[in-house]
Amino acid sequence: MQMKFKSITILIPLILIMFFLSGCAASGAGSASGWPGLSVDKDTAYFAYNKEVYAINISDGSQKWQFPAKDAKSKATFFNTPALTTDGQLLVGGYDTALYSLNSQSGQVLWTYPALNPQTGEPDFPSPPKTDRYVGSTLVGEHGIFAPNANNYLYAFDSKGNLLWSYQTGGPLWARPISDPDCSCIYISSMDHKLYSIDAQTGKANWSTNDLGGSLVGSPALSSDGVLFVGTFGSNVLAINAETGKILWQKNISSLQAPPSVGQGSTSFWVWGGPTIKGNRLYFGVQGGYFFTLDTTNGNVIGTPFKADGAITDSPLVTDDAIYFGTDARSLYSLDLDGNVRSGWPKNITSKIYTTPAISGDMILIVTTDAKQLLVAMDTNGTQKWVFPPPTAATPTGSK
């Protein structure tokens, strides 16, 4: 079942309803999500949303460039986090089935895969069919560029956009892969309920788990001692041996914090974003707004789960002294590392927040779905520094 993009405010609820009614939490089928992606590098923030990719000065919120240019015609839409290479490429997958490499300084196209048809300007995807969408973000690794696609394939490219190999899983890939510094392998979550370890050089599978009880749409987190942590739409969080794929422990979140009116089959405990590791603690939020802290060694809950005012749909940002995450109720929260809300928080944002905040120096950056303030910069105490576009600027092209 395919669904045309209309607006972010109706897309997320429709996706959730579609998952629920179609049994996607059990089967792994579905359409793409539609929230913006954000990454930072030194003095620049890059974010992709709807019909544009932007480069913004972190110091003052001024625009460096946008792709495509204001007057350019393009059918592409973008809903994932741009990824930077060491040679100055910015990689972002399009919902038009193409992977784009842009010059990070100018926004000019360096290459696309597949190449764009010169007559139509649309991608010529040879195989699989032209229903492919880039939802998950690209990984830039030592052995190549790795792009997950909603057509069930993970693609590997060299730095010039040449296809090296592809690997087919049993379900759509919505999550960014992660790499392992201790081996030439990458790990990818799939909506077929499995986690995969794939050799980055050959594209061959090292292992895949059995059914983990629900679709995986968030990236796994890898600890320094070789343990992977991942959450599912089956309301489970698991610890998995990165070398063998063996499950070390498994926790059902709904049994840890379930109000009497919420059953274990509820979508309230779906884990959308991947967990974040800090020391021996694992931090993550769920669809129903609960925010959990678990002990990485055994999965036991630390403290009391915090209840936010809305759904938490991406990973938290965890610094040395604070945790930051947004909700679809337009709130940006900051907790201490014990899971207690910090004084003066949460902060109200004018739009729903679906994406992990980013940090640059003492600046916290939040990307929203509001055309009048797509990017918000705050200091670590929550004082707003600037918004993009500025209040006097025109509404960005393609925004709604």
Image: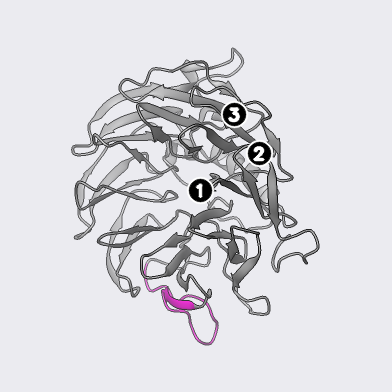
Q: Inspect the image, locate mark 3, and give the three-letter code of the amino acid beneath it.
A: Gly
Quarter of the rendering containing residue 68: bottom right
Q: Secondary structure at mark 3?
A: loop
The residue singled out by tag 3 in the image is 289
The residue singled out by tag 1 in the image is 30
Q: Secondary structure at mark 2?
A: loop
Q: Is residue 104 magenta?
A: no
Task: Name the side, left or right, on which 243 lies relative to 216.
Answer: left
Question: Vertical placement of 373 versus 16: above or below?
Answer: below
Q: Position of residue 366 (x, y in %)?
A: 61, 48
Q: Position of residue 323 (x, y in %)?
A: 52, 33
Circle on res. 382: 2
**Which badge, 1 or 3, comes first in the chain's sequence?**
1
> How many angstroms separate mark 2 from mark 1 (CA)?
36 Å
**Which badge, 2 or 1, comes first in the chain's sequence?**
1
Q: Name the residue rendered at 47%, 64% in the picture.
A: 92
The magenta region covers 109-127
Viewer-closest of 386 and 354: 386
Q: Residues within 10 Å of mark 1 (few under 14, many from 20)?
A: many
Mark in the foreground, 2 or 1: 2
Q: Is residue 231 visible?
A: no
Q: Inspect the image, locate mark 2, and give the three-letter code of the amino acid beneath it.
A: Gly
The residue sitting at the right extreme is 392
Q: Secondary structure at mark 1?
A: loop
Task: Name the side, left or right, on which 184 lies relative to 328.
Answer: left
Q: Position of residue 357 (x, y in %)?
A: 55, 45
Q: Position of residue 342 (x, y in %)?
A: 61, 26
Question: Vertical placement of 358 versus 242: above or below?
Answer: below
